Amino acid sequence: EVQLLESGGGLVQPGGSLRLSCAASGFTFSNYAMNWVRQAPGKGLEWVSKISGSGDSTYYAASVKGRFTISRDNSKNTLYLQMNSLRAEDTALYYCATRIATPGAFDYWGQGTLVTVSS
Amino acid sequence: DIVMTQTPLSLPVTLGQPASISCRSSQSLVSSDGNTYLSWLQQRPGQPPRLLIYKISNRFSGVPDRFSGSGAGTDFTLKISRVEAEDVAVYYCMQPTQFPYTFGQGTKLEIK
């Protein structure tokens, strides 16, 4: 069974940093690209970042480029999102998501981890 | 960026009646490989999103056949043939054809 379990969220002051993790199981992690998607309270979904299965290629939304870094450790089956220079507008539930069985769609999602940026 | 525009944003429906949600993209979603990767997701209250439909019209595993997708190019539709209580949720369309991947604003389906 595919499982994605996010962790690392919490309360952080503006300008601070946080690292999110997503532990994956139930599939060959290194074979699949991974994504972070966020959802501000009461708002819609926003794609944040993607990393290839090997980790060689990364992509970012303009709103986080230069502040967030996506990475992965295939030996630990874990995806990361290093978030620096956090702003109030980064407050959101952060999901990891991937495409395993379907072309061009996010077919598996974690439960999310909440990041709150506030003084 | 490709803008995904959903209508309506709020959809009150009587149990057992059909429902339809439209999604329009600002650019064609036909990929370089000839496929169109438009998907629909359902997000029930307090839950993560769940994939319903991929590549316009393919139901994901376990999705009831009352859900169907159609469309082409820039115009797409999600239909529910007979709404059930468990369908109360926000529905999103999504495109992974071009970075940044983008979602529609979401359509909130409620029971009338």
Image: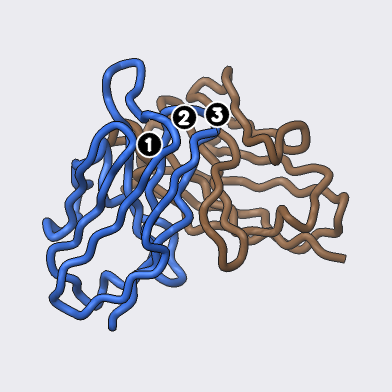
Chain colours: A brown, B blue
Mark 3: secondary structure? strand
Mark 2: secondary structure? loop
Q: Check contact, mark 1 vs mark 3: CB within 8 A.
A: no
Quarter of the rendering containing residue A115: bottom right
- Say whether mark 3 and mark 1 are on the same chain: yes
Q: Between A49 and B97, which is closer to the camera in this rendering?
A: B97
Amino acid of disc 1 = Arg
Residue designated by label 2: A33
Q: Residue at x 63, y 39 (%)?
A: A80
Q: Residue at x 17, y 51 (%)?
A: B68
Amino acid of disc 3 = Ile
> Left of B88 or right of it: where is A17?
right
Residue designated by label 3: A51
Dot 2: within a 10 Å radius of its alpha carbon, few (fewer than 14), some, or many (20 or more) residues? Answer: many
Residue designated by label 1: A99
Q: Residue at x 28, y 83 (%)?
A: B112
> Left of B35 or right of it: where is A47?
right
Q: Chain of mark 3?
A: A
Q: Check contact, mark 3 vs mark 2: CB within 8 A.
A: yes
Say which quadrant the N terminus of chain B sits in. Answer: top right
Q: Check contact, mark 1 vs mark 2: CB within 8 A.
A: yes
Per the model, the C-alpha gap separating discs 1 and 2 is 7 Å
Per the model, the C-alpha gap separating discs 1 and 3 is 12 Å
